[in-house]
Amino acid sequence: MTKLIIIILFSGLSADNLLEKDRAFRLVLNEMKNSQVPEAFVRKAFNHDGITKHKEIPERFARPYEKKSWPEYRKLFIKESRIVSGEKFYLENIDLIQRVVDQFKVDPFIIVSIAGIESNYGSHHKGFTVFNSLYTQIHEMPKRASWASRELAAYLEYCFHDQIDPHTIEGSYAGAFGFGQFIPSSFTMFAVDFDEDGVRRPYDWPDVLASISNYLRSNGYTPNSANYKKAGDIWKSIWSYNHADNYVMAVLELSEKIRERVIQRH
């Protein structure tokens, strides 16, 4: 029995020693020094068997979609299947969309288009756990380590306050998650509990569409604006969502395609 206790204690000390040597743990813990999240919660998150550094993540950053030429990028999103899905999504959620528009005063087809490009209306929104994505960036991408540390700290705060296992949410290679693909700090700042159930849910459309709208409004979208020109308020607000002109052009064109389809057929 004594031998077993010694082994267990030694194993525990070894685990703690390994954790202290983990650069990601040290950076994130420092980011959270003024947080109300207990250190025990952070330690538990970093002592998980599922933690993995994915070599594919730096590779994906090296060839982002947004760096493609406009013709190549356009083919990914401005296609018949995406337009049909957008039309269907709009009609199935028209009452919800109208309530969101009434509150936030944004173009309904812009928010539908963003939902389509970000997650194909909820069908494509994951690939890596958010934890592993940010953890990998800290260890394997030195230029992103500070940013990823702040985002992982924000993510752990969200998980603690909403009582979520940090290793259960999947997202993009960059660490964005939910149907709106918000990074953790943006989710904290802009997510909306639109259905007023007490929780901001990244996978429930009322909260997602309102959160997208709130993000746009908070980043320069003028209420009821019709200025779609480059450098106009709508362009700038969409660009803030994803810092790439290709992205903005795709959102705007897809929104017009869906609008035209809805008007023509209904």
Image (cartoon, helix red, strand yellow):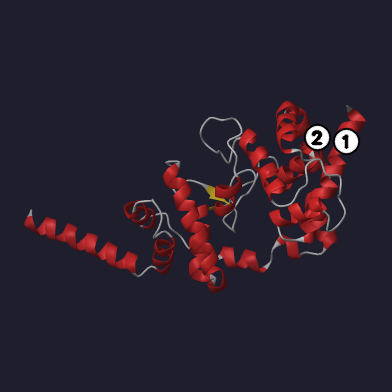
User: Could you classify mark 2 by the number of other residues whose Cα lies within 10 Å: few (under 14), some (14-19), or many (20 or more)?
Assistant: many
The residue lying at 76 percent from left, 38 percent from top is: 105
Which of disc 1 and disc 2 is earlier in sequence?
A: 2
Q: Do callouts 2 and 1 mark residues in contact (Cβ within 8 Å)?
A: yes
| Residue 231, quarter of the rendered image | bottom right
Q: Which disc is residue 87 wearing? A: 2
Q: Nearer the viewer, residue 179 or 189?
A: 189
Vertical placement of 213 versus 219: above or below? above
The residue lying at 28 percent from left, 62 percent from top is: 15
Q: Nearer the viewer, residue 34 or 62?
A: 34
Q: Position of residue 24 (x, y in %)?
A: 43, 65
Please name the amino acid that badge 1 sits on: Arg
Q: Say whether residue 22 is visible.
A: yes
Label 2 and label 1: CA atoms lie apart by 7 Å
The residue lying at 80 percent from left, 34 percent from top is: 87
Q: Position of residue 75 (x, y in %)?
A: 82, 54
Query: Is 157 placed left or right of 120 in the picture?
Result: left
Please name the amino acid that badge 2 sits on: Glu
Q: Position of residue 197 (x, y in %)?
A: 53, 30
Disc 1, SS? helix
User: Could you classify mark 1 by the number of other residues whose Cα lies within 10 Å: few (under 14), some (14-19), or many (20 or more)?
Assistant: some
The residue lying at 65 percent from left, 45 percent from top is: 180
Q: Position of residue 164 (x, y in %)?
A: 44, 43
User: Which residue is disc 1 drawn over?
Assistant: 261
Vertical placement of 39 versus 204: above or below? below
| Residue 12, quarter of the rendered image | bottom left
Q: Nearer the viewer, residue 191 or 183?
A: 191
Q: Nearer the viewer, residue 67 or 187?
A: 187
Query: Is 172 placed left or right of 120 in the picture?
Result: left
Disc 2, SS? helix
